[in-house]
Amino acid sequence: MSFAVVVLAAGKGTRMKSALPKVLHPLLGRPLVTYAARAAQQAGAERVVVVVGHGAEAVQQALGPLGVRTALQAEQLGTAHALASARPELADWDGPVVVTMGDAPLISSATLRGLAEALPAGGGMAMLTFEPDDPAQYGRVIRDGAGNVARVAEYKDASPEELAVREVNAGVYAFDAKVWDFLAEVDRDNAAGEYYLTDLIEVYQRRGLPVRAFRADDPSELLAVNDRVQLAAVERVLLERLRERWMKEGVRMVMPETVYLEPDVELAPDVTLEPGVMLKGRTRIGEGSSVGAYSVISDSELAAGVEVRPHSVLEGAVLKEGAIVGPFARLRPQAVLEKGAFVGNFVEVKKSRLGPGVKAGHLAYLGDAQIGADSNIGAGTITANYDGQKKHPTIIGPRAFIGSNSVLIAPVRIGAEATVAAGSAINQEVPAGALAIARGRQRNIEGWAARKRRASDSQEKGNSMEGETT
Ligand code: UD1
Ligand code: CA
């Protein structure tokens, strides 16, 4: 069965109350419009055309990676007008056309293909209807005495009796190639002053061509996004599906309803996700690893047996087997923790490699650093990597010991097994095995407290004598 799919996505989406075009609102991190476009591709459509208009350039950019065609509807005069705008991209196409809405992201490829296959052989159209929990502002499906679809009453045009109808139009259709001629018969004589695609139903019927309507079994697949409440409802459906899928693959979720994860995330069996965890982008987590409560991980790679303790934030990080981070750790892009490395609370790591067994337990900033195996980074260590213009590297050899509250002024090298005394400001190379102390020498003043006490006693006496004379 060969067919083309047109996705209508030119509208503004006024009810989102947003500066962003509706179809670009992120749904689990991906622009809304990419869902319908992908479903069309996966359905095996010969050609996919997305009609863009409001925010056309940005929408085209979002669709770029998919490689679909786009057609411009410069002025948004309604859904029938939108379909007509796709005509130039289908000028050489004389097969069936499936139309679906860019604001209905849950549509499946099977449903799109099924509708194309349901198109009457001798011409006509097919459409999908469903019964949502809330018929909201969907077009109501008006059936005649014989139970056939007579027309769709749009929300703005519907009478109170029509609004009471629970069956609504999904906005998903298959048309034969005559649709291009029939579009010319649609006018804008309605409450919205728009060219309604739904008016094609009556055009087909006037010609005595069949209109087949199918009631979908799974209404959640046809939910559209017109406001932010509906966006959240659709996101909830997608999240539930994703969580179920991963739990069936062996992932343990504590309070799963609080776990957020995006479609490109990959999880191994026996991964544990605690409440409030967010996993975004291309995050991969290996077998037996755990992510503590309220941690946010994006585009990161965690090997097996990694432990992320609560409230940690990881972005573009790589953690090898057995690494431990947190609570309250912050790993920024290109932070690499080799096997068994440990980064504790309030430690920030950016573009740095921590060798196997390296420990940075507390309160440190490690940026542009290479740290050799089994080195210990004391609390409060700072790599001063920025001179106001450029970033510079800090290279630390294996088994080095950096005392607490040291500042390592980059570019600087610290050799293997070297020790930096606590509180040092290091701006020269420390040779392997050396001890570097770079701080003011301590001086003790014996008996200082007693002297201070005597001094303040005699002053007080002076004050009280002054008191007697007045
Ligand atoms: C439309 C249907 C309604 C159906 C509902 C299903 C019509 C007239 N109404 O209503 O029967 O129940 O979808 O979700 O078709 N668009 C354009 N150009 C335009 C106008 C809209 O490309 O000029 C696009 C929008 O970007 C959107 C889609 O078409 O992705 C639907 O438009 P929208 O305004 O949301 O239509 P509804 O009122 O929801
Ligand atoms: Ca809509």
Image: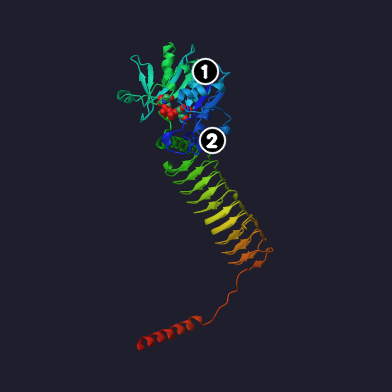
Q: CA separation, marks 2 and 1?
A: 29 Å
Provide residue 92's location: percent of width, then percent of height: 58, 18
Give the side of residue 404 with respect to residue 466, left or right.
right
Q: Is residue 170 visible?
A: no
Front label number (2 vs 1): 2
Question: Which sits earlier in the primary sequence, circle 2 or circle 1?
Answer: 2
Asked if residue 379 is positioned above or below residue 125 in the image, the reply reads: below
Disc 2 residue type (three-letter)? Ala
Disc 1 residue type (three-letter)? Pro
Q: Residue at 55% across / 34% down in the picture? A: 57
Q: Residue furthest right?
A: 431
Q: Element type at marker 1?
A: loop
Asked if residue 159 is positioned above or below residue 439 in the image, the reply reads: above
Q: Residue at 40% across / 84% down in the picture? A: 463
On the rendered image, what quadrant is the N terminus found in? Answer: top right
Q: Is residue 258 visible?
A: yes
Provide residue 128's location: percent of width, then percent of height: 43, 22
For mark 1, what is the residue?
96
Asked if residue 138 is positioned above or below residue 349 in the image, the reply reads: above
Q: Element type at marker 2?
A: helix
On the rendered image, what quadrant is the C terminus found in? Answer: bottom left
Provide residue 358's location: percent of width, then percent of height: 60, 56
Give the side of residue 39 with respect to residue 237, left or right.
right
Q: Is mark 2 within 8 Å of ligand 1?
A: no
**Can you tell which mark lies on residue 58?**
2
Q: Give the class, few, some or many, for how many residues have Cα within 10 Å of label 1's Cα (few <14, many ≥20).
A: many
Provide residue 425's location: percent of width, then percent of height: 61, 65
